[in-house]
Image (cartoon, rainbow, N blue to C red):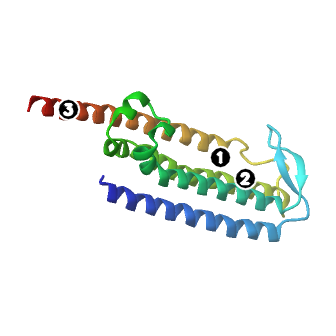
Amino acid sequence: MTPRGEDRAFVAVATVVGAAVIAYWIRSEMLIAAAPPSIPVHFDLHGRPDRWGGPGELRLLAVIATLLAVAMLGIAAWLPRGARRSPGLINLPRKPTFLRLPPDARERVVAPMRALTALLPLLFVGLFWWIAESMAGFAGPGGSARLRLPWAAPAVVLGLVFVLVGVAWVRTSRAIRAAAAEARDVAGGEARR
């Protein structure tokens, strides 16, 4: 994908993340308005509440999800520039090889990590949304005495994070190897001239 195409893709993903955050805030405010004065804010390993608080704590989850999304999108937006100007700040596989690459090659190489960093906020916003729904649903009308599927959503999100990080790590490692071989070929071609 060209840098311009990568930028369009990043803007599209950032827009989807922004829409998800806004939808989460709207739903969070709806949950707060409908919640009883006391809701569970922490659950034990078996899905039973072990700490209670006010519905305003749902807003804290929305704040944390928003800050996390903004931080990750900010890092994703910075990665191409960082690869050119401050490559030592970026932790990647084959880092010594990455640091020896020319700036334009380093920028191309960070594309898989940039995509991952831009997509992860969607998973985290979804996880926080599930937590808020669980907290409000537990205490609301017809609420259960136990959190439904207490480990399902976190396990799915964590599993997806590990898979996505693994895929991005492998793709980045291969991109670094290919860029290094290309740089060697270019240098070898110039030496023969």
| Residue 99: % across, % down | 39, 34
Question: Residue drawn 85% across and 50% down?
Answer: 145
Residue 148 vs residue 130, the one in the foreground = 130
Give the residue type at disc 1.
Ala
Task: Give the label on residue 18, or none.
Answer: none
The image shows residue 187, relative to residue 111, as above or below, that is above
Mark 1, residue position? 153
For label 3, the SS is helix
Residue 94 vs residue 152, the one in the foreground = 94
Question: Residue drawn 38% across and 37% down?
Answer: 171
Disc 2 or 1, which lies upstream in sequence?
Answer: 2
CB under 8 Å between discs 2 and 1? yes
| Residue 121: % across, % down | 57, 53
Q: Is residue 114 left or right of residue 186?
A: right
Q: Is residue 50 left or right of residue 182?
A: right
Task: Give the label on residue 187, or none.
Answer: 3
For label 1, the SS is helix
Q: Residues within 10 Å of mark 3 (few under 14, many from 20)?
A: few
For label 2, the SS is helix
Residue 184 vs residue 126, the one in the foreground = 184
Instruction: Give the CA separation, mark 2 to mark 1.
Output: 9 Å
Number of numbered discs: 3
The image shows residue 2, relative to residue 152, as above or below, that is below
Residue sitting at the far left: 193
Disc 3 or 1, which lies upstream in sequence?
Answer: 1
Give the residue type at disc 2.
Ile
Question: Residue drawn 48% across and 55% down?
Answer: 77
